[in-house]
Every structure is written in C-alpha cells, then in structure tokens.
Image: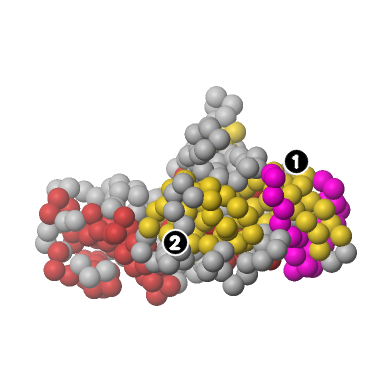
C-alpha cells in the first residue's frame, strides 16, 4: 500500500491541447478516491498519467516515496481494472487471474495460492475452469478485479469499470467493489462519469471539469457545501435547480426575488453565509435542491415567504417519491456541464424539478402551491460562480 501524490501535474498534447491543468491530489494510504466529471474533462487522462500510459508534461507524481515521472508502467507497482475488462478470451478464469504472476515468474505454488484466495474472496471458485465467453458481465468484472488483487499492488487504478454493465448489476458491483477495497485496504484511484457511483463509493470525491480540479471533499460535504455552480449542479440527482435572483438583506433576514415571486432570506442562511450581506441589492445565483421543494399541503415548513406558485408540467411517480416538473417565471442559470440536457425553449416548459412526497395530489396542468425549505438554499456569485460563504 502507498500514497499517491500529484503535485501541479499538467498534460499538454503535441497538438497544443492542454488536457490537465495544475492538478493537485493527495490520495492517502488505503483511501478510496473517486475522480468524477463529464465526458472529455480529463479524468481518464489523469488516471493514465498515474499508470504511466501517458507522459507528464509538467509537475511531479509520486507513488509511495518514489517520484515516478519517468518510471515505466510495469515498474510502478500498480494494478489497473479497465472498462472493457481486457481478459484473454482463450484462457480460463484461473489463467487470466494468474497471468501477470506467471509473467513475473512467481513460483507455481504461490500463484495457485494467490489465485484461489482471490477467487474465494470474489466468489469465483466454481468458474475457474471456464473461459470469459462463458461468463456474465458481472462475473467477467470479478475476474478483472481478481487479476488486480493477486498482484498485491501498492495501488489500484480503475477506469470506469462498471460502465458496460446494466443498471441493476452496476448497483450490485459498486457495493461489492467498495466492500472489497475496504477489506483489502489498498489505495484506490477510481474514475467515473457517474456522480451516483462516485458518491456511494468514495471516501473522498474529486470533481474535475475541462482539466481543472473543482473541489475535493467527502461525498456529503460536496453535496452540502459545493464550491461553485458546476459542482452544485453536477453532484446530486436530479440536478440542483439554478436561478438568477435578486437579494435584499435587512437585519437578520431579508428577501429573495425569484422572477415575479419572493422568498424569505432565513436567519440560518445569513448566519451560515455572512458574506451574503455584501450582496444586498445585487443579483446572485440561487440554488434549490429538488428535495427542498415540497407540496405545500403536505409540508411542515410552508408559510409566508416559504412558498411559490407554479404550473405543473409533468409527474414522474417512482413509488417512494414523485418527481414534479414545474415552471417558475425566473431566468435559469447554465451550470456549465456539457453533458446536461437543456430544457427546450418555450414559456410552458418546466424549468424546475421537485422531489415530492408520493401522497401529493398535484396534477399536470394545475398551478401548485410549493413549499421551499429556505434554510437549505444555496447562493453563488453571479460572475465568479463561486459559492458565497464567509
């Protein structure tokens, strides 16, 4: 086991494209760190630089106490798990798992011991004589994990290993990988574009966009205290609702003008975000998570300054909750996520989504009274897009 440190690491390709900008990451010994971001943001490039499959244009990279900028991939003491599994189709599961050890001329007895121990941990005992083509996607993924485990590396590198699996199997496998990593205690760097995967698996999560690191923190802190508009919208599903709003601060409270309606600025928000006083009379980006909207008839926090009226466009009944799509007469703010699906134009289209109690009786075509948990609102500078706190 070892720490992995990236110190001001850059990647510039021969055509001048700057893929990674001054990336700083410290992955602790035994930590599970997930790097997440939209398509083309540089996350796989970062992983490939750690692996030695991409050269570093600038900065320093260390695995353990050793600088590995110029160290060959085979000498970096890392094991990779790929998106496509990269199994040898003509070999049995046993031979696939033990192949790297065979190349390293490890004694046969030790190979057998390590392969059987890994197969026991991964519940592959009964499949050791089969070939990859006879296995399910989840079983092939376990074989790829077994091949990494037997090497007993200083660190695991995983490049979107679950993206080829169906939704139900992805949920199962991400739980298994997280549990296995905790059991083995191996430093793990995991790349994904799936923020749900990142939030449920990582000890810490690093968010990257356009080659720039946006924020690194625990999953809960990323959710509760996003550093900027992009992180706020990218972390959480459905995404945070973002609007251009006007702020008025008065005493221990104030008001928020959201289009043609007004919400109260709570004393809790002002106490937690003293810098909001500097935005009196100014426009800000207001963020509201879907779970902070509720049917006012069922909410305990409804009342003056805590409610909005909005026409409902669509309901998605999920059993345990209802996703309610509605329209607020306010200008939305682009989060900067290139993968986000933008709403089509038109005055009747929804520009907000709320996570309602399944007992709600709101219906499409009706105007609903919607309660807002004003103490949970998020605020960002309209120009810098940074969160407003101190």
Q: How many marks?
A: 2
Q: Nearer the viewer, residue 342 or 202?
A: 342
> In the displayed structure, does residue 171 sit left or right of residue 22?
left
Which residue position holds label 1? Answer: 383
- Colour mode of the rendering: secondary structure
Q: Residues within 10 Å of mark 2 (few under 14, many from 20)?
A: few
Residue holding disc 2: 361
Query: Mark 2 and mark 1: span between their CA atoms?
Result: 39 Å
Name the residue rendered at 43%, 67% in the picture: 359
Q: Residue at x 42, y 65 (%)?
A: 358
Q: Residue furthest top?
A: 15
Q: Is residue 73 visible?
A: no
Foreground mark, 2 or 1, reads 2
Q: Position of residue 200 (x, y in %)?
A: 45, 64
- Tell me, yes or no, whether the highlighted magenta stretch contains residue 314: no
Q: Give, as a single range, the part of the protein colored magenta.
A: 259-282
Quarter occupied by residue 332: top right
């Amino acid at each position: 086991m070892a720490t992995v440190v990236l110190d001001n690491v850059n990647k510039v390709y021969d055509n001048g494209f700057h893929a990674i900008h001054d990336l700083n990451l410290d992955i602790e010994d035994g930590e599970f760190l997930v790097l997440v971001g939209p398509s083309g943001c540089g996350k796989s490039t970062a992983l490939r630089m750690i692996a030695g499959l991409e050269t570093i244009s600038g900065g320093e990279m260390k695995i353990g106490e050793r600088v590995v900028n110029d160290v060959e991939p085979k000498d970096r003491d890392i094991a990779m798990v790929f998106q496509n599994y990269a199994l040898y189709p003509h070999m049995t599961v046993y031979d696939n798992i033990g192949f790297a050890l065979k190349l390293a001329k490890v004694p046969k007895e030790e190979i057998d011991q390590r392969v059987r121990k890994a197969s026991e941990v991964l519940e592959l005992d009964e499949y050791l004589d089969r070939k990859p083509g006879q296995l399910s996607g989840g079983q092939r993924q376990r074989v790829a994990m077994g091949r990494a485990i037997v090497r007993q590396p200083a660190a695991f590198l995983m490049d979107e290993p679950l993206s080829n699996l169906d939704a139900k199997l992805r949920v199962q496998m991400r739980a298994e990988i997280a549990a296995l990593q905790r059991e083995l205690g191996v430093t793990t760097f995991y790349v994904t574009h799936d923020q749900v995967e990142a939030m449920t698996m990582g000890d810490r999560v690093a968010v990257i966009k356009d080659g720039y690191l946006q924020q690194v923190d625990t999953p809960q802190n990323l959710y509760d205290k996003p550093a900027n508009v992009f992180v706020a919208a990218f972390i959480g599903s459905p995404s945070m609702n973002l609007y251009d709003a006007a702020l008025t601060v008065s005493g221990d409270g104030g008001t928020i003008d959201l289009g043609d309606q007004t919400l109260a600025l709570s004393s809790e928000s002002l106490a937690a975000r003293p810098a909001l006083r500097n935005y009196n009379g100014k426009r800000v980006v207001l963020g509201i998570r879907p779970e902070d909207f509720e049917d006012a008839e069922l909410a305990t926090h409804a009342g003056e300054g805590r409610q909005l009226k909005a026409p409902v466009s669509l309901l998605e009944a999920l059993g345990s909750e209802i996703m309610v799509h509605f329209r607020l007469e306010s200008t939305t703010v682009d989060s900067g996520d290139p993968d986000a699906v933008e709403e089509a134009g038109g005055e009747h289209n929804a520009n907000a989504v709320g996570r309602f109690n399944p007992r709600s009786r709101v219906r499409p075509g009706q105007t609903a009274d919607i309660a807002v948990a004003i103490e949970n609102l998020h605020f960002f500078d309209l120009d810098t897009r940074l969160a407003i706190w101190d």
